[in-house]
Amino acid sequence: MSSHLESAVIAQPRPITPANLAIIDKFIKPQVNEEVLQSTATIITTATMPQKKRVIAMAVDDTKESYYAFTWALNNLVDQWRDQVCLLNVRPFAVPGYFISSSEFYPSYSLDYNEEYVDSVETFNRDESHALLQQYGAELLAKGVQSRGIALRGNPKETLLQKIEELKPDIVVTGTRGKSLFRGSISEYLVQHANTVVIVPKWN
């Protein structure tokens, strides 16, 4: 799976114009919470229903570290009869590294900074995120595991933590490091701030 679309670096801030305000209102301010998939893979009867369903949230991206954490959890943690796995993927803003002051607009990246271009970046990133969640979801379905897939947008640390606090899962699984979702110390951030158990399978 290819990485989210990026563009060339620019050095100069841009004054806030009506066009920039439209871009901010459309592509930065709105929260993204897209339910990409929801499957009940197993027919659960009264006889097989567990006393308490367990929810496992997994933060996923397109790196090998993320896939390792996913497969480790699937093989060592997930109970087909008891668990629902909620896959979370955070895509970047179509205007990465933005900063807005009262009079200037600082996008970190741009080729041709206009709404049509930003819309194309947003569409690309959204499609990549949805395809990634569907790819992981297919593996869960093959194992007979109930699953959800939620596409988010924004700062990975803050966005993941906010969604985890909303979902209140029993366990969170996240990879150790990587180039996209796990850039920096996201796993450490979740371990420190999430009000639930966070498991970080070690990538060798």
Image: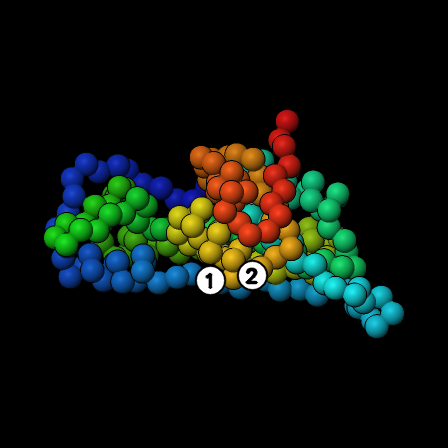
**Label placed on residue 33:** 1
Query: Between 112 and 101, which is closer to the camera in this rendering?
Result: 101
Location of residue 167 by image quarter: bottom right
Task: Where is residue 47? Give x, y as percent.
Answer: 87, 69
Label 2 crowding class (10 Å Cα cut-off): few <14, some 14-19, many 20+?
few
Q: Counting residues from the N terminus, which is met first, the one under dot 2 or under dot 1?
A: 1
Q: Secondary structure at mark 2?
A: helix
Location of residue 55 by image quarter: bottom right
Q: Secondary structure at mark 1?
A: strand
Q: Nearer the viewer, mark 2 or mark 1?
A: 2
Residue at label 2? 167
Query: Between 145 and 119, which is closer to the camera in this rendering?
Result: 145
**Distance from label 2 to label 1 (Cα)?**
12 Å
Amino acid type at image mark 1: Asn
Give the farthest residue toward the right.
47
Horizontal arrangement in the rendering, residue 2 relative to residue 173 (left or right)? left
Asked whether residue 182 appears in the rendered view, the answer is: no
Q: Residue at x 20, y 60 (%)?
A: 21
Task: Where is residue 110? Give x, y as percent.
Answer: 25, 44
Disc 2 vs disc 1: Cβ atoms closer than 8 Å? no
Asked whether residue 47 appears in the rendered view, the answer is: yes
Amino acid type at image mark 2: Leu
